[in-house]
Image (tube, helix red, strand yellow):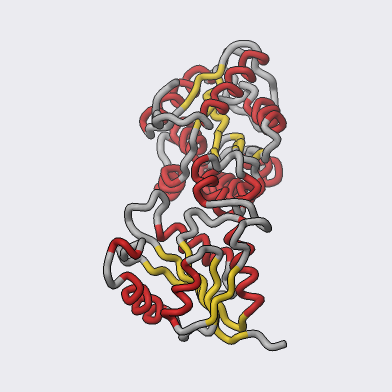
Amino acid sequence: MSKYKHGLLLGKFLPPHRGHVYLADFARNFVEQLTIVVGTIPSEPIGGDLRFKWMTELFPECNVVHLDKDLPQEPSEHPDFWKIWQRELLNISPHKPDVVFASETYGHKLSEVLGARFIPVDPDRSIMPVSGTAVRDDPYANWDLIPSNVRSQYYLKRVCVFGPESTGKSTLAKKLANHFETTLVPEYARTYLEQLGNELEFKKLLDIAKGQAASEDALAPRANKVLITDTDPLSTTVWSQFLYQKCDPQLFDLAKSRSYDLYLLTDVDVPWVEDPVRYLPEDRKNFHQLCESTLQNHRRKYVPISGSWELRFQTAVEAIERLFDRGPKNGGQSV
């Protein structure tokens, strides 16, 4: 049995979820060519350009288009509601659709005004019991229903363990990743220096920071609600300033572009442990002060981590759990 040639799927995808993925997969398997129209207006809580990007990533084989005009959203809002939507959809679509797909009741009327056949898909949500409202209201309770690109780019909490050498950063990061059953981004500097020489030369710093960022971006889609990173590019700028009193502009820009929900700033109130890739046994306190001032200057939200190993872990866990509470952001301050 041959497919219909051209199909159309209209949605807000606010945000895209597993129900939308099923709907689009159904549609693209029903027709030869599917156009997905991402309809957005400025007042919606998630930006239209971002939703368009997500749908393009999810369905690269489809013709994904962005209808970002501030159109009426209900027939009661304008006497020519259906004529307006008929005009806009036919203008933005590369082909007049033979078929319109929808899970909502408006699919009947939309198909009629476009002169197409209506194909309903899971209207009672028995196959995919999920809604955009439920995901927006509590994304973490509905985590498994959100595509990985949407999770990693929008909902994922990012926590960076930050501070001087030999303050338990790597151990704490591993324990936190295990506790929250999520992914750990290890310190790339150790990998780089162990393979290419232990001397922390100025010319190596940009590569180290880029490697840290690349590893984080590669691992983020696998994370479970929170991603734990053992240092970040901003930490590399601290090393650059501390050792060389200067910073490569590319390194600075990279660090500035990276966003984290929380930093855990580890204190120096623990014994020094020798290691081939550690450099500053006598300067940890000064380095800690530079770490803290850097976080403050960049307005990064951070929590001081000090005391016994048990207390450090407990403080970190409680700080991360607070990220999932609703409340104002507290950028660049100790909390």
Q: Is residue 203 visible?
A: no
Viewer-nearest residue: 269 or 71: 71
Q: Residue furthest left?
A: 79
Give the image location of residue 306, x and y in percent: 57, 15
Residue drawn at x 60%, y 51% is 130
Give the image location of residue 2, x and y in percent: 68, 88
Residue drawn at x 37%, y 52% is 44
Residue drawn at x 70%, y 45% is 195
Q: State which quarter of the image contains the C terminus.
A: top left
In the rendered image, the vertical position of residue 6 relative to residue 108, given as above or below = below
Q: Is residue 166 visible?
A: yes
Quadrant of res 7: bottom right
Viewer-nearest residue: 11 or 235: 11
In the rendered image, the vertical position of residue 115 relative to residue 13, given as above or below = below
Drawn side of residue 117 relative to residue 309, left or right: left
Give the image location of residue 270, x and y in percent: 62, 14
Viewer-nearest residue: 186 or 13: 13
Count the marks.
0
Q: State which quarter of the image contains the N terminus.
A: bottom right
Residue drawn at x 54%, y 40% is 138
Drawn side of residue 183 relative to residue 251, left or right: right
Viewer-nearest residue: 167 or 218: 218
Give the image location of residue 277, x and y in percent: 66, 32
